[in-house]
Structures are given as structure tokens and as C-alpha cells.
Image: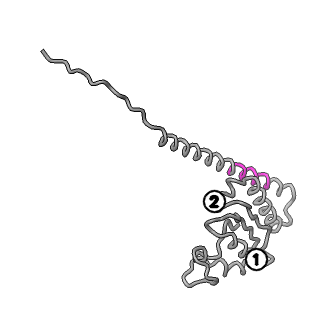
Amino acid sequence: VLHSPFLSVIRVVLDVGFTTIGDLFPNFDRVGDFTCPVYIIHGSDDAIVPFYHGQTLFETLPDSSKTVPFWARGAGHNNIEMDMPTAYIKRLQQFVRQCDRLNYPNQSSAKRIQQQQKLKQQMLLQASLQASLRQSMNQQQQQQQIHHETPIPMIHRKPSKQRKKK
């Protein structure tokens, strides 16, 4: 699973059209050698890793490794699973099922269905936890904004008269 993948680290900053010396992650040069199924997820409005990086990697994959990619329309770099949890999980499950069929062609349907249901429950729980976390973070941000925007009331006291000691 390649989530918002880049052609290379250097090409994220400056795409010179080739792999430079010292690039630690030359993905573009490596995907042609892949032999396993590859699932690419990329947001079409990704401002961190340009969308064409994911598209180019997909096009460079050997046909035997290509699976239907998830091009998340309107999504950025860090919000696909948060803003599109149902589609994200559903498409990921489809990929996992496809891999299961390739890896375990003789496994019984009942056992495969049971494993798929367990995986689905785990993924739904994870999505639910992520949504709860996001909601909690949003509430905290709102509270901080309210705290910063609300002026602190000033208490005005009348000057007290000091009593004379006898």
C-alpha cells in the first residue's frame, strides 16, 4: 500500500526529471521491479506531494502489480482517511481481499469471509477512533480559541480605608 507516494524525496522539492545522487528514496527507479500487488492512494489536491507523483508511479508499475488505485478527489495529503473513511476502508478491504485470493487460492470461502469480517471490524474500529480523536482535537482547538478571544473580566475594587491602630 503506497499512501500519497512520491517519485523520490528530491523530486518532491525540485523535480529535475531524473534521480539525483544521494536521493535516499528513489521510488520511481524501484517500482518497475515490484512483483507483488500494489495499491496506491493519493489525494488529487495534495499540496505536499504532487498528485502526478502517485499517477506516475502507478503508470511505471509492471502490469502484474497494478491494482485499481484510489484517487481521492478533492483530498489533500493528510485528510483522506479522515474525510472519506467509508470509501477509504472499503477500497482498502477490496485490495486486501484481492491479495488474499492471490495468496490463498485454495482457502475455503467460509474461512476467508470470517477473516474479512474480522478485518472489517478492526478497520471500522480504527476509523471510529480516528474520528473521535479528530472530534476531540477540534473541540480542544475551539476551546483554546474561545479562551484566547474572551477577555478576562477585571474586578475593580474601591480603595480600602486603612484603619488607624490605637
- Secondary structure at numbered mark 2: loop
141 with respect to 113 (left or right): left
Percent position (x, y) of residue 143? 53, 41
Residue at image x 66%, y 48%? 131
Residue picked out by circle 2: 78
Write down the quadrant of residue 20 in the picture: bottom right
First in sequence, mark 2 or 1: give its number.
Answer: 1
163 above or below 39?
A: above
Residue situated furthest top in the rendering: 166
Q: Is residue 144 left or right of residue 45?
A: left
- Residue 117 magenta-drawn? yes
Figure quadrant of the N terminus? bottom right
| In the image, residue 75 above or below residue 60 | above
Query: Residue at 69% across / 69% down in the picture?
Result: 51
Residue type, mark 2 in image: Asn
Q: Give residue 50's quadrant in the image.
A: bottom right
Q: Position of residue 74 (x, y in %)?
A: 71, 60
In the rendered image, residue 58, in percent from the top left (x then y), is placed at 74, 74
Vertical placement of 67 versus 76: above or below? below
Residue span colored magenta:
115-126
Q: Is there CB contact under 8 Å for labels 2 and 1? A: no
- Where is residue 15 shown, x and y percent of the image? 61, 79
Quarter placement of the C terminus: top left
Q: Which residue is mark 1?
A: 59
In the rendered structure, the answer to whether residue 135 lies left or right of residue 100 reads left
